[in-house]
Image (spheres, grey):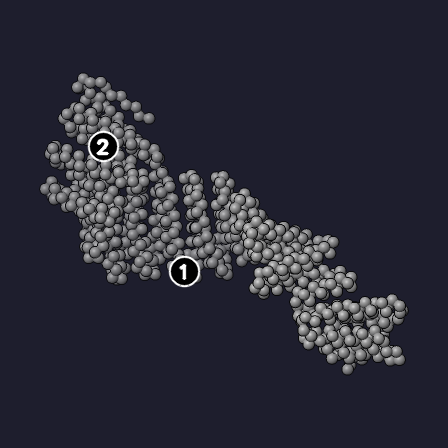
Amino acid sequence: MGIINRFKRLILQSKDKSTKELFDSLLTVLSNPEDAFAYVRTLSLVDESQPNPIIDSIFENLKLHLKVISGEIEQAEILDVLFQLNQSWDILSYELENQDMHKEAKIAEMFKHLTANVIEVLTLQKNTPFRLARCAEIAEEFHETNLLKSFCYTTGVSFLEFSSLVQDDITKKSFLEEAIHYHKLALSFSEDIDEAYALNSNSLGIIHLQLSELEEDSFQKIDLIKTAINSLKESVDAAIFLSDVEKIEDFAISVTHAYSKLVALETSKETKKEAYLEMIKYYQKTLDISKTRHDINAQVEYEYSIGSIYLYLAGIEVEVKKRIGHISAAELHFQAVTEIARENKQLEGLQDYLKGLEEFGYSLFLEIVETEPTIEGKKILLEKLIKIRKNTFQINSELESSDIQDLMQESKVISEMYEKLTNMHVNLDAKSTTLRNAVEFQSKSLEYALELRDLNEVRERSNALSNLLEWLITVESNISVIQELLTKAIQAFRNLLSITKTMSDKKMEELSYCTLALLLRVLAENELNSEEQISKMNKALNFSSEGLKKAIENNDIHAVTRNYLVMGTILTDLLTTTDQLEKRNLYAKAKNCLFESLKLSFSIKDDDISKKCYQALAKLSLSFSQDVELQEKLEIIEEALGYWDKAAEIAFKLNDFVVLPKYSFASGKCWFDYAKLEPDPRIQSNYCSNALQKFDETITYGRRLGNTDIILKASSIMLDIMSFENKILLENKTHLRTFKID
């Protein structure tokens, strides 16, 4: 009972002690209900000669409150209890007006604090929104403005919390509307911008967002989200006014989330643009704050988010300059992510961001590329995408924890993007550059596949690399570059062949043999030393032979088709290295191989191989025609002309404008050679006209590709044809032909 005596002494010495001290002591004693009972009894015995009915009233009410606290009174009775408490206060106030008693005044002051304390305990013990709402009413009746503001805010928060526990949408909506009411009420008591103003504005925004999710009407939903955005923005402004950095960041993030909901519903592109720009503005606030507090994780998150929003903006922007501007901005923020990553390789969740950057950036960028109306625009966008993905790939490859499977896939994707970019270029130098990059990343992908010993991936990567190298050879004009690339590739495929033999993978062996044959054949074609050239050709032929055997063993019709083509091409090259007798034999073998490949390409409907077969047959015919009699020569050249036409027809169907000028040039040259061999002047003139037509096509295609070299060559031969034809016309006394070259 020592504590009770202490309170008794404090009351008796009330002239010297502050109300606050009494209040603080009361808070302590209220932690124990028995002490509280005893304490109030002590108050009633202060003046034992005159028991006071007011003290008894306080005691009775306190008993009720203690029962509420201890849970003895059901929730339904709580409001009645609080109402009785308020009535008691009214009675006490009235009594005090008619009595000038220091003791009763002190007790009344304590009772006022006791009331507030009981309310506080109630909120802690059974924190229901309805009880809090009643607490707010009591605070209002006591004219406790600060307490009222506090309870209004707490009540609003409680209604919001309880709404998440309710399954019924109608009740949920009702709770949210009550929450709005109390937060607005709290705001009405805020005369200045203070913390309460910031908190209530933020809560109002969050509640309106919750309400929008319950609204079925899309227009009403959008209105609610816009209302939420306004409230959330006010909370950010308040936090800025208060210089509360933590709240600025938290509230600004809420604004960006609200805008994300708005853009998901909005159909107007202009409104979406405005929303995206506002999102960027508020994310920028959070980014600036994260930089000042050196929070690397937050910086990565915000840089990534801003970059993503710029991509979305680019996706809906029609104006090309603005679109490119948004892409450039996204690129800068994604670059920031990779730079932070490069300097902080142990950053938590770093790989998740890089992975998200790859996947998100890839899908969205490609979507933008597809919708971009101009080829130049597509190229710029794709180049930026490649740059971003190369950066993330580089960092991933440096991380010890990186998954090799992911690295293999990413290098493959980058190679495919370079391939896509190559198709957009018309300039041969540009094509060559992007193809070299495609080869580089496809080679990396193959290395990872080999490291994983994933046979399917090894097979796919090898096949893709083989096709890229074959393509590169057709567009690269620098012989030294070709030789360097081929030498590296040959070594890589030799290593691959050794590995696939240990794996007992016959399909991979076939592909390795075929690719080696193809690469060696091209390397030999660019070899200046004749002995070395023949040696490489023979090696290529041996590899091709092995590849064909494996393809037949595997019963792989596609592989058989490909190997017959490669073998026929190599045999064609060997024609120039043998005597006349052997040449005819080689010609027959080569022609047989190429016709086999052509026949099979028709059955598997592979237009690309069919095109290459016709091209190879034309070259074979022209090569063999050099050392035969005139009549046979004319027949073979006529065959070649037919092959060139067929090859060009398929190339046009495939939109392969890289080879079209080459085919037109070769066909024109054939017609001119044919004309020079033909004795009949009239037929000669017709052949010259055909040749000129083909060279005119060559120049047209050449201009489209920016291939100056082939344009000059075609123009030069056209002048020769014009001169030759005029000579024929003079000799036969007919009109001269004039020809103008642009």
Quadrant for residue 169, please give it: bottom right
Quadrant for residue 449, please give it: bottom left
Residue at 49% across / 44% down in the picture?
A: 316
> Which disc, if any, is residue 669?
2
Q: Earlier in the sequence, mark 1 or mark 2?
A: 1
User: x%, y% of residue 694?
Assistant: 26, 31
Q: Tell me whether the residue at label 1 lies in contact with that at label 2, contact meaning CB atoms closer than 8 angstroms.
A: no
Closest to the observer: 571 or 615?
615
Tell me how far mark 1 sits from mark 2, CA to CA.
54 Å
Residue at 32% across / 34% down in the picture?
A: 702
Element type at mark 1? loop
Residue farthest along the bottom direction in this orientation? 1
Residue at 51% across / 54% down in the picture?
A: 340
Residue at 78% across / 81% down in the picture?
A: 2
Label 2 amino acid? Lys
Q: Quadrant of the N terminus?
A: bottom right
**Residue 60 as seen in the image, left or right of residue 428:** right
Closest to the observer: 144 or 319?
144
Q: Quadrant of the C terminus?
A: top left
Q: Which residue is mark 1?
A: 403
